[in-house]
Amino acid sequence: MITDLPHHLLDGPATAPPLILGPSVGTSLAVWEPQLPALARTHRVLRWDLPGHGRSPAGLLPSDGSATVGDLAALVLRLADAQGWERFAYAGISIGGAVGLHLAAHRPERVESLAVVCSSARFGDPSAWRERAALVRAEGTEAMVASRPGTWFSHRFADSPRAIALLADLRACDRAGYAACCDALASYDLRSALPSVTGVPTLVVAGRDDPATPPAHAREIADAVPGASLLEVAGAAHLAGVERPEPVTAALLAHFTQDTGTDTDTADDASRRAAGMAVRRAVLGDAHVDRAIARTTPFTARFQDFITRYAWGEIWTGDALDRRTRSCITLTALIAHGHDAELAMHIRAALTNGLTREEIGEVLLQSAVYCGVPAANSAFATAQRVFDELDGPDGASNAARSS
C-alpha cells in the first residue's frame, strides 16, 4: 500500500508550465542536474527519486517481487496531484522513460508532452532482471558498481567528477528499493501499446554508444508512436544527458517549448537563451554568472542577453567541437588580442572543461609562435596568477571572488 510521496524537489517559476523529470535505476534526481538550469527557466520542474534511491523510502514499492512500472507511474500521478497539476509535461531516463510511456499509453489525458531518454519499450529478458534483483537483495548495490561505468558512460567520461558522483548515488541506494525497480523492469513490456500513444507529442533520445538501451530500442519506440521524433546523440552511452548535456538539453528545450503555445521565433529564442545559460553556468560557474547577472543594468541588459543567446546558446552548444577544444581556441584568441581579464576567466573555465595545467601551458606555448612572445609572456603571467590563487590556502574562495 503506497502511503507516502517520493522525495522530490521543485525548481523554476511557480506559474510556469509543469514538467516532471524521472531518473534511471541506480541514480538520484541529481542525474538531471545538467539540464535543470535550462529547463527551470521555462518550466516549473519537479524531479523525483525512485523508491530506495536518493531520499525516497524503499517501501514505496512492494518488496515481494510484484512491483511494476505501473506502480511507479501511480507515484508520479500522486506527485502531480499534490501540486494540483491536472496535466504536465514529462521526461524520463531509462526506467523513468518507461514510466512516461506507461502514462502516455494509459493516462494520456494527464500528459501534455513526453520525452523518453535512453529507454525502451522492453528492457530485455525478464529473467536477467530477476537475477539482478536477487543479486542486489543478497549483496547490495555495491555488486553493480563495477559494471556501471562502462554502461552509463563512454570510457572518456567514466572518470569525470559527475560520473563519480553518480556512482556514489548507486552505492547509497537501498538494496530493497533497487531490487524492486528491477522487478518492475522484469514485468514491463509496452511494445503492443506504443501505437496507442496518440495526442501526446513524443521525443525519443538515444545514446549512440548505449549498451543498455541501444539506438534500435529508441527507433522501435519512435517508429511505433505516431508522430514521434528521434535524436541519436553521438559519443554518449546510457546516461546521454549527463555525458553530452548540450544536445540533449537543446532537444528537450525545443520539444517542450513548442508545447507552451509560444510562437516559433520566441520559442527558438527562449531555447537558445536557456541552453546558453546552462552552458555558461557549467563552464564559468554559478558564482561568476550570478555576479554578472547582478551587475546587469538597463544599459547592459541587451548585451548580456546577446552573449547568452549567441555566444553560449549557439556557439558553445554546437556538437562539432567538444568543450576542451573550444577552450583551447578561446584561450588562443584571447591571448592574440591581449584580453588578460577574460583570459584569466577562461583559464579557470578550461580547467573546468577538463584541460590540465600542462595542456594549458602547451596552448600558451603554441600561441607564442603565432601570436607573439610578448602576448604569450603576459598570458603565462596571467595563468600563473590563476594557478597561485587556486593553490593558495583559500584557493576555492579566492577563485570564486576573482572569476
Image (tube, grey):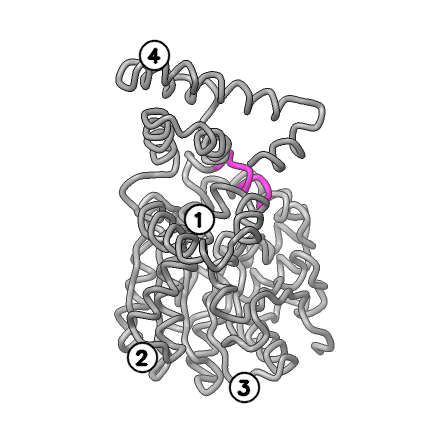
**Numbered mark located on residue 373 in the image:** 4
Which of the two marks, 3 or 4, is nearer to us in this view?
4
Query: Regarding mark 1 in the picture, which secondary structure is present there?
Result: helix
The amino acid type of the residue labelled 1 equals: Val
Which of the two marks, 3 or 2, is nearer to us in this view?
3
Which of the two marks, 1 or 4, is nearer to us in this view?
4
Q: Residue at x 46, y 67 (%)?
A: 91
Q: Which residue is mark 3?
A: 86
The amino acid type of the residue labelled 2 equals: Pro
Measured in 3D between alpha carbons, the distance from the residue under mark 1 to the one under mark 2, in whole angstroms, is 36 Å
Residue nearer the viewer, 156 or 394: 394
Q: Are marks 1 and 4 in contact (CB under 8 Å)?
A: no
- Residue 179 is one of the magenta-drawn residues: no
Percent position (x, y) of residue 169?
Answer: 63, 48
Q: Are marks 3 and 2 in contact (CB under 8 Å)?
A: no
Q: Residue furthest front?
A: 299
Q: Residue at x 38, y 19 (%)?
A: 364
Please rate how many residues cluster around mark 2, counting C-alpha atoms within 10 Å: few if below 14, some from 14 to 19, many from 20.
some
The amino acid type of the residue labelled 4 equals: Val
- The magenta stretch is 158-166
Measured in 3D between alpha carbons, the distance from the residue under mark 3 to the one under mark 4, in whole angstroms, is 64 Å
Measured in 3D between alpha carbons, the distance from the residue under mark 1 to the one under mark 4, in whole angstroms, is 32 Å
**Numbered mark located on residue 242 in the image:** none
Q: Which residue is mark 1?
A: 279
Query: Regarding mark 3 in the picture, which secondary structure is present there?
Result: loop
Q: Quadrant of the C terminus?
A: top right
Which of the two marks, 4 or 2, is nearer to us in this view?
4
Q: Which residue is mark 2?
A: 195
